[in-house]
Image: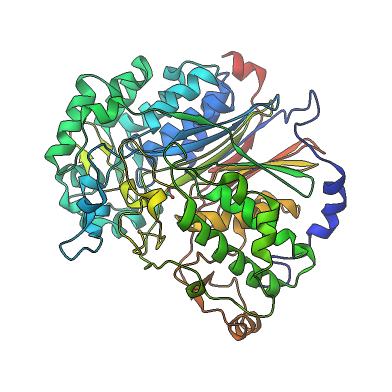
Amino acid sequence: MRADRLGHGLRLKVGLCLLLLVLAPARGASPGEAAIASAHPLATEAGFEVLRAGGNAFDAAVAVSAALAVVEPSSSGLGGGGFFLLRHADGRSGFLDARETSPAGARAELFLAADGRLDREKALNSALAAGIPGLPAALEHLAREHGRLPLSRSLAPAIRLAREGFAVDEKYRHLAQARLAVLRRDPEAARIFLEHGEVPKGGWVLRQPELSVVLERLASEGAGFFYRGAFAERMASEVRRLGGIWTAQDLASYRLREREPLLIRREGAVILTAPPPSAGGVALATGLAILERFRWRELSPTDRVHLLAETWRRVFRDRAAHLGDPDFVPVPLDLLSDPAYGAGLAASIRLDRASQSAWLPGGGEPVEGSDTTHFSIIDAEGNIAAVTQTINLPFGAGIVVPGTGILLNNEMDDFALAEGQGNAYGLVGTSPNAPAPGKRMVSSMTPTIVITGERTAALGTPGGSRIVSMVMLAVLDVLEGRSAAEVAARPRVHHQFLPDVLIAEEGAIEEPMLAELRRRGHRVAVESRRWGNLQIAIWDRSVGRLEAASDPRWAAEGAARVETVTDAEVKR
Ligand code: GLY
């Protein structure tokens, strides 16, 4: 990594940051324009359409979330879940946990092969892999409790996109190729998402009329029909016919959870992030506490990468040992987010030599693949939504509930299903993350808001386990004063305890640093594939300016924009 990459810019900003502890923007301050960064220009436009109609950031979040479910079906959908981190302009914050839950009939043994090993086909590519969806409940709640517009108005762009269709992009084609064999196996998925059984050609128009009907019902009736009554019963029986175990009672029992965001204070900044069942916020809290013990800003670029690897090794170990659904198991959140605990872990780190994950308990195997999506919104008044939503792997389980257009997620794989065997991201877990009726599986999704003395940033990314390291790198970048575009573009490194490998994007680590890291004892793998799709909006309150950036690894024109929403448009 070059000297400027995980570099030294922070020194310039830190004096100011230390002086200003900002819990809320100055009274009366507001950006005056709005910023949206999402993974798809049509979803971003859906958000602006709703802002122009008089909506706030939360109405726009409903619009963007639902539009992404239509135009980026590989990444999220009504059949999936998500985390919604919200901050009102008056300083109130909230967190909607719309994570999927385990059906009552799920047991880890259902996912094992005869030899006792995890059967990845069952855990990833079957109806058994599907958790009970949370996104419909979240959309209704968000509109009712935080928005200004009726749900029907905020869902209108998504309904239109599903009914009229849109031309698929390169990312769609790339992910359809990656999951082609699975999509071909399900006649309904193949009919909707493939062109005569093949990856569609560029410009092919994807129309989802069945999904538009479901969205119309959501718009007119709210989410009740999805969870109770004839529609829910039909979905459950179709999922059972396809080999799954959903019951109508599983759907009726689904509850959205409102939780307190996890709050971290560092260097005069306030960081709001995802609490359990996300593992990402806790990792951020422990990780930042570890870095603090090392005078992070004064370290050389090589020391920074070394220290990040040692930090992630430890926070991912803690994830495997402690993280689970807080409604089911005691998660030692106070301990893990206590700076003293981070200091204790820091004491076991040497800057001149790598430790080894084998010295710590656990074991796992890496398997490729991840999807999920994130968007960030700051409206003209200063309301903020940072939302990460998912159906897990690209196109989830690759199975559509017939007649609904709804893709099943394969989120059950995020439970610890087999002792010592990693999930699709190579993540290991233990009994706190074992499946149980109605329990939420641990997630890496980490929507985050960073408030420094001068700036407020909303950020997040997909990327499976790598979300955790990407969000931490982005938070450090924001604290160093980098622009939205710089934060989104920066090269990435990752470590997750197991496998014991420091992974780097091509170009992130240059030869002399690579040699030095290896000399210190790191196993380093340089990957040619890009990872993550970070979406970030920053409000520089000191000059009253907004920025938005989409990750250049995937960004399409118009995915991240700042716009002035005029009074005339609002009144229309
Ligand atoms: N399904 C990916 C995650 O929630 O971490």
Q: Tell me if residue 505 comes above or below residue 512 in the rendering.
A: above
Q: Is residue 324 visible?
A: yes
Horizontal and vertical percent position of residue 290: 68, 60
User: As rendered, which of 40 and 324 lies closer to the eye?
Assistant: 324
Horizontal and vertical percent position of residue 256: 42, 29
User: As rendered, which of 264 and 6 lies closer to the eye?
Assistant: 264
User: As rendered, which of 70 and 387 lies closer to the eye?
Assistant: 387
Q: Is residue 229 left or right of residue 455?
A: left
Q: Is residue 393 visible?
A: no
Q: Tell which residue pokes out farthest to the top in this image.
A: 571
Q: Which image quarter: residue 57?
A: top right
Screen quadrant of the N terminus: bottom right
Q: Tell me if residue 220 comes above or below residue 267 in the rendering.
A: above
User: As rendered, which of 558 and 85 lies closer to the eye?
Assistant: 85
Q: Tell which residue pokes out farthest to the left in this image.
A: 241
Q: Which image quarter: residue 187?
A: top left
Q: Is residue 540 left or right of residue 282?
A: right
Residue drawn at (73%, 52%) of the image = 479
Screen quadrant of the C terminus: top right
Residue drawn at (24%, 30%) of the image = 210
Residue drawn at (17%, 50%) of the image = 196
Q: Is residue 322 left or right of residue 509?
A: left
